[in-house]
Image (tube, grey):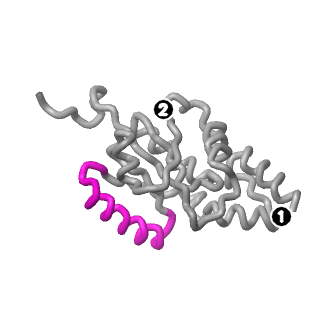
Amino acid sequence: MTAPLPGDPAKHVVAVYPGTFDPITNGHLDILRRALALFDRIVVTIAVNPRKQPLFTVEQRIGFIRDALPDYQDRLAFASFDGLLVEFARAQGATVIVRGLRALADFEYEFQFAHMNRRLAPGIDSVFFMTDEHNHYVSSSLVKEVASLGGDVTGLVPPAVTAALAAIYAKQ
């Protein structure tokens, strides 16, 4: 028996797309849509980062993603984790880790992690997507900062996130 060829329907490729997604941006969604064009199933993995104080709960973040991508519900799964990403990926049956790159600083950081992950789990590869030209400067932190100062984040995040940010910062 030979190994399945790329694109072979007998091979079901699962990827994980990790991040804090607090909140999800249109840049994240662009990468997720493009990854869905290549992989059969994607587990959007909400990282629990004790160094960060999230603005939104894990459930809210998942809700924003589901709301923004209604056509992909059967190919998306959601989970949170707080350990080694490669161990989580193995447990999900994933062979790919999806990451986005905005700038050179992202590349250096991701380059180190990709190599360490490859050392820890040789059967799991990292696949990088460059952000599109409309979103290369957008980060969740920047979106929250602009929204907290009363700035308009329309077009940078899905409409549900824009509304949620406006509601949070209107109270403060």
Could you tell whether 172 is left or right of 55 in the image? Answer: right
Residue 75: give its label.
2
Residue 150: give its label.
1
**Residue at 61% across, 65% down:** 52
Q: Which residues are magenta?
A: 102-124
Q: Position of residue 132 (x, y in %)?
A: 53, 56
* Principal secondary structure, stretch drawn in magenta: helix
Q: In the structure shown, which secondary structural element does the residue marked by tag 1 occupy?
A: loop
The answer to whether the residue labelled 1 contacts the one labelled 2, judged by CB atoms less than 8 Å apart, is: no
- Say which of 96 and 89 sits in front: 89
Q: In the structure shown, which secondary structural element does the residue marked by tag 2 occupy?
A: helix
Residue 1: give its label.
none
Amino acid at pointer 2: Arg
**Residue at 39% across, 40% down:** 92
Q: Position of residue 109 (x, y in %)?
A: 43, 69
Queried whether the magenta region covers residue 59, the answer comes back as: no
Q: Which image quarter is the C terminus in?
A: bottom right
Q: Position of residue 19 (x, y in %)?
A: 52, 55
Q: Is residue 70 above or below residue 90?
A: above
**Residue at 34% across, 37% down:** 13
